[in-house]
Image (cartoon, grey):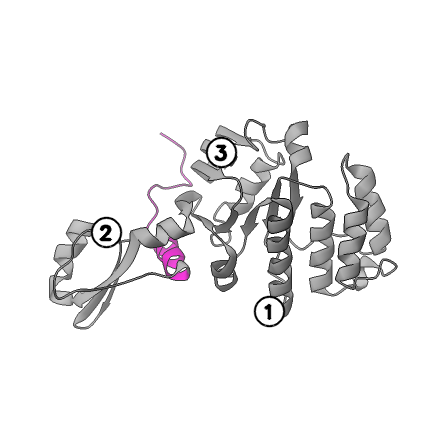
Amino acid sequence: MNLSIIETAGLGKRYGHSWALRDCTLDIPAGHLTALVGPNGAGKTTLMNMLVGLATPTAGTATLLGPETPGSSAALDGIAFVAQDSPVYKNLSVADMLHLTRNLNRTFDMGNARARLAGLKIPLKKKSGKLSGGQQAQLALTLALARRPQLLILDEPLAALDPLARQDFLSSVMTAMADDGVSVVLSSHALAELERVADYLVVLAEGEMRLAGVVEDLLAQHRILTGPSAEADVYTKRLSPVQVKRAGAQTHLLVRSDGPIGADWESAPVSLEELTLAYLRAPATRAIDKEAA
């Protein structure tokens, strides 16, 4: 049986009377690149902070790497976390960043880190703050990978990067997965890039989990139906579509169903971006910001 790299049950975090994340239940197998998607304030960073032990859950439980508890020594040894904005000490040289990170961690592959930076043509003597945005992101990734983690968690690493730097960064992540077997959770708004690399999807909105699963399975389970608007209500009632778009005489339904449809309706596959946006726009299932009854 495949190891669950992340498993949560009813996980939630409340600040005062407002829930940042509520009732989040996940079971993510090892070996995936998991795209964690949602608008600002959806609960993505809250979830990641709880997984790495930077925040304590208000409700529910979480385990990592099989049986490990977030924040425990065993979990911390097996996880590398790169926070938003590619955090590096800008007044330190790249070499100083390597030595500092090695001294702060029980495991650090200095030889691999140096070789990786050399391959990226990032000079060790250069101040971290003088590197380009893409180089700073690659430095942060190098420091994380040198810890030889089983799980790599990346919080919006693509946000400040240009298209070429984004492509290079994701290529580096995919290489690490192939070479070292690391599992990855990547939070990002860049749906176009994620569609090319992610094979597991978690969609968060308004503090709740809207969708989670293997991308291939989710795409197979959903489709877009197009047909006469006069018949739309029948299919809306029967199929409970995720999204309804009416355009004059035609209506488009994004549904989670593999059942039969009417002869006058066309069925088309859905893209990852279409699927994600539909679930992000779907109404919340509960008022996440209200005190539980």
Give the amino acid type for the residue marked by disc 1 in the picture: Pro
Kindly identify which residue carries mark 1: 163
Kindly identify which residue carries mark 2: 258
- The magenta stretch is 273-293
Q: Position of residue 159 (x, y in %)?
A: 60, 60
Give the amino acid type for the residue marked by disc 3 in the picture: Glu
- Secondary element at image label 2: loop
Q: Position of residue 259 (x, y in %)?
A: 19, 51
Label 3: how many residues lie within 10 Å, few (<14), some (14-19) or many (20+)?
many
Q: Is residue 184 in sight in this rendering?
A: yes
Q: Nearer the viewer, mark 1 or mark 2?
A: 2
- Residue shown at 12%/63% (left/top)? 263
Kindly identify which residue carries mark 3: 7
* CA separation in Å, label 3 and label 2: 28 Å
Q: Is residue 189 in sight in this rendering?
A: no
**Which label's residue is closer to the chain start, 3 or 2?**
3
Label 2: how many residues lie within 10 Å, few (<14), some (14-19) or many (20+)?
few
- Residue shown at 33%/61% (left/top)? 270
- Residue shown at 14%/58% (left/top)? 233
Q: Is residue 255 left or right of residue 39?
A: left
- Secondary element at image label 3: strand
Label 1: how many residues lie within 10 Å, few (<14), some (14-19) or many (20+)?
few
Q: 158 above or below 70?
A: below
Q: Position of residue 130 (x, y in %)?
A: 80, 64
